[in-house]
Image (cartoon, rainbow, N blue to C red):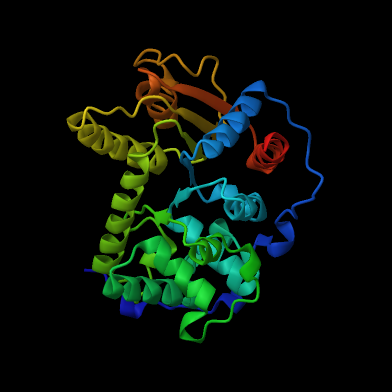
Amino acid sequence: MFDRSKLNILPLSERQHKMTVNDIYPLDAETPDYENEHLNIVAERIVQARKNGKEVIWMMGAHVLRRGNSRYIIDLMNRHVITHIATNGACAIHDFELAHIGATLEDVELYIKDGKFGNWEETGRYLNEAIVRGYTDKIGFGEAIGRLIQNEEEDLVIPHLDISIFAAAYRLGMEITVHKGIGYDITDQHPAADYAALGWTSGEDFLRFAYVVSRLEGGVFLNLGSAVMGPEVYLKSLSMARNIAAQRGEEIRHFTTANFDLIDFTDFQEEGKPTDAHYYHRPKKTILIRTVKDGGESYHISGDFSVTIPRLYQLILEYS
């Protein structure tokens, strides 16, 4: 097997970054105009769902944070608009680094040349040690990271606590789940990575997420920039939830889904043929078509997250 103990692990102070806290929008920032009638509908559905006490699930890839949206998400959490956040290991990494050193996003092309990419001490050590403690305490991956950042565990200094989504979730007692695979993230390279702990805590988060999906009737599910993880975790969770609901004579069919992506579709509600490239696009097939065919409604929002997310935030406040 590969011996991780031989890796040359460098401090974050030696890394160049392509993003800093200055790239995160303030709540009152002027953002580019964006008009999309479907986005208005999605915002209205979110507001109505919360008025009715229903779930609003926010599943995202890390690119949503990279485009400067942390404060918008945290404010929606504080307002109890978002009821559950689900994400991946990369999101935890960027959230932690921004809170800890005020910067993130290494230059992969630069550092992969000599194997420096991903081999950074603070990110690998702090996050993995938090996961091991989470495993010991039998809590989920997301909760363990939120606790690390919020409580500044292990003498960790967090000068930018206000822009950490994970810390905000922990303070609010709100579920934030991380759905990862081994080898997806730079933290898996570090010698401190305990794969049993990673698997158990992420498995715990999968079951927590599935429970929230079991309450999706009348609610809203948003997938923001996750091409594989989001659709697949959602699909399996929904099947599990519907399995038990059916045994009780209940339904989980009347809800709204929305997929946010740079990709645009001519017709996002038509599955197409196996010879069409978009036929294999998981967000389209799973989130926009198959899981809403028997009672739900779906919407596709195309555009850069630096534009679509701020506009969604503004619309939610307008409709609230």
Residue 1 lies, with reference to residue 298, above or below; the image says: below
From the viewer's perspective, is 179 left or right of 104? Answer: left
Question: At 52% from the left edge and 62% from the top edge, which residue is drawn?
Answer: 172
Residue 12: x %, y % from top left = 56, 75
Question: At 34% from the left edge and 76% from the top edge, which residue is drawn?
Answer: 133
In the image, 267 versus 37, the foreground residue is 37
In what quadrant of the picture does the N terminus appear?
bottom left
Q: Is residue 302 visible?
A: no
Residue 88: x %, y % from top left = 43, 53
Question: At 70% from the left edge and 35% from the top edge, which residue is drawn?
Answer: 315
Question: In terms of image quadrants, where is residue 194?
Answer: bottom left
Residue 182 lies, with reference to residue 136, above or below; the image says: above
Residue 10 lies, with reference to residue 1, above or below; the image says: below
Residue 155: x %, y % from top left = 51, 86
From the viewer's perspective, is 14 left or right of 2? Answer: right
Q: Is residue 216 visible?
A: yes
Question: At 41% from the left edge and 64% from the top edge, which residue is drawn?
Answer: 143
From the viewer's perspective, is 257 left or right of 251? Answer: right
